[in-house]
């Protein structure tokens, strides 16, 4: 549908959607580190815009921690509710919050607010279960794809239902395709970047060919072209090579991507091949894309000795800023400098994600933008 446009992540946002870690998830062994890391991330986002945080209905400990950290903000609760009801949030849940603790609003000592939605959650990866923002016939809509736990690897029944639980039905467009937000990149002008490793993985859409998948992407997101990569991966990435860890649009004509200069590293050949693919891509006007090379981190391992998929490409656009994951690596500073030069109008800020990467994801993976309504 050409009256529909998949928005770019640097467009004006209303809030960032996240989900808080709880003990009944895979975060159990790292729960204290995880919660502290999420609060750290939330504080950084709140310097730029509001946060909608999903907290599991059974996670009273998590609510207590959040209540202790963020001072309750009562005076503007009603106006904040009204603002979001008129925007995106599900009216029924918001109305119930007047008599039940489904939605809390906290003063964050910033111009922005933390909205807590009580729903059932499996995990924390909002990028992949969150609905995708599109502009459709002049209105903001949310394309809700099917989330099946990255090809049936992990439980996903609660997370798959979150978008339809918290957002008003009038904004939702249901898509009959399994798709995670981290597997696609939009330049906001009709071009989508993705890869075959993830989208053609057999446990996502086994009944669809590559051409059929592309046809659905064009239909739901109003695309003019889909750019497919065939190379690039990170050890420890159990998403089947999500593009948001490898190559990202930072403007309509510019792609930032990770590189590996160590010929002894297992990633060297694959990332070199991905770089060659990116260099060969053409814009709709026939010109090549501008490319911004990002450095690689040193190898990081978990307690079991498994390598973790740390990547500087997993950054998050916020209003007027860019939050970049850091890992206590010598290349942290270099990555921040490169992105600051590439995006001079954005305030580029590093966010320590060493605890987050322990569960094989990073900053962009746990966040999903909700566009200005």
Image: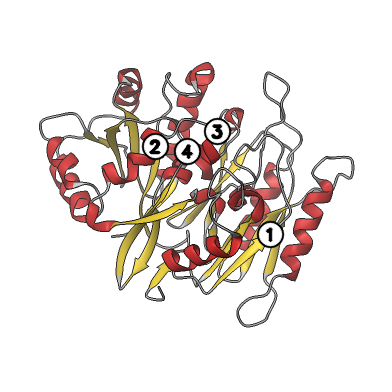
Q: CA distance from mark 2 to mark 1?
A: 28 Å
Q: Position of residue 113 (x, y in %)?
A: 29, 42
Between marks 4 and 2 in the image, the one whose residue lies nearer the viewer: 2
Mark 4 touches mark 2? (CB < 8 Å) = yes
- Residue at image point 42% right, 38% down: 42
Between marks 2 and 3 in the image, the one whose residue lies nearer the viewer: 3
Which of the 4 quarters of the picture holds residue 319?
A: bottom left
Q: CA distance from mark 1 to mark 4?
A: 23 Å
Q: CA distance from mark 2 to mark 3?
A: 14 Å
N-terminal of the pair, mark 4 or mark 2, is 4
Q: Residues within 10 Å of mark 3 (few under 14, many from 20)?
A: few
Q: Residue furthest bottom?
A: 285
- Residue at image point 65% right, 58% down: 256
Q: Position of residue 348 (x, y in %)?
A: 55, 52
Residue 186 in view (yes/no): no
Which residue carries the number 1 mark? 229
- Above-or-below relation of 274 to 105: below
Q: CA distance from mark 4 to mark 3?
A: 14 Å
**Residue 159: mark in rendering:** 2
């Amino acid at each position: 549908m050409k009256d529909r446009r998949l928005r770019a992540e640097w467009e004006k946002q209303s809030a960032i959607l996240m989900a808080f870690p709880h003990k009944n998830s895979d975060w159990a062994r790292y729960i204290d580190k995880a919660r502290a890391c999420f609060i750290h991330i939330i504080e950084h986002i709140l310097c730029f815009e509001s946060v909608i945080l999903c907290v599991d209905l059974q996670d009273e400990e998590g609510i207590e921690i959040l209540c202790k950290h963020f001072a309750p903000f009562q005076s503007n609760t009603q106006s904040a509710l009204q603002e979001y009801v008129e925007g995106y949030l599900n009216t029924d849940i918001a109305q119930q919050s007047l008599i039940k603790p489904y939605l809390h609003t906290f003063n964050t000592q910033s111009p922005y607010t933390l909205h807590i939605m009580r729903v059932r959650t499996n995990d924390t990866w909002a990028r992949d279960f969150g609905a995708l923002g599109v502009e459709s016939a002049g209105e903001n809509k949310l394309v809700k794809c099917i989330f099946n736990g990255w090809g049936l690897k992990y439980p996903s029944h609660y997370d798959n239902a979150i978008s339809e639980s918290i957002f008003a039905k009038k904004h939702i467009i249901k898509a009959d395709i399994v798709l995670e937000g981290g597997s696609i990149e939009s330049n906001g002008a009709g071009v989508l970047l993705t890869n075959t490793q993830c989208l053609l993985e057999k446990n996502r859409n086994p009944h669809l060919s590559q051409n059929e998948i592309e046809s659905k992407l064009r239909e739901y997101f109003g695309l003019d072209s889909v750019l497919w990569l065939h190379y690039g991966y990170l050890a420890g990435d159990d998403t089947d090579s999500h593009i948001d860890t490898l190559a990202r649009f930072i403007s309509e004509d510019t792609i930032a991507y990770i590189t590996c200069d160590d010929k002894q590293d297992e990633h060297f050949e694959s990332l070199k091949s991905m770089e060659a693919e990116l260099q060969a891509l053409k814009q709709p006007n026939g010109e090549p894309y501008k490319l911004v090379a990002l450095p690689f981190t040193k190898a990081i391992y978990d307690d079991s000795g498994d390598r973790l998929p740390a990547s500087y490409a997993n950054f998050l656009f916020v209003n007027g800023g860019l939050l970049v994951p850091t890992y206590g690596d010598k290349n942290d500073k270099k990555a921040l400098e490169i992105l600051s030069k590439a995006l001079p109008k954005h305030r580029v800020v590093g966010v320590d994600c060493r605890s987050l990467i322990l569960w094989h994801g990073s900053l962009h993976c746990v966040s999903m933008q909700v566009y200005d309504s």
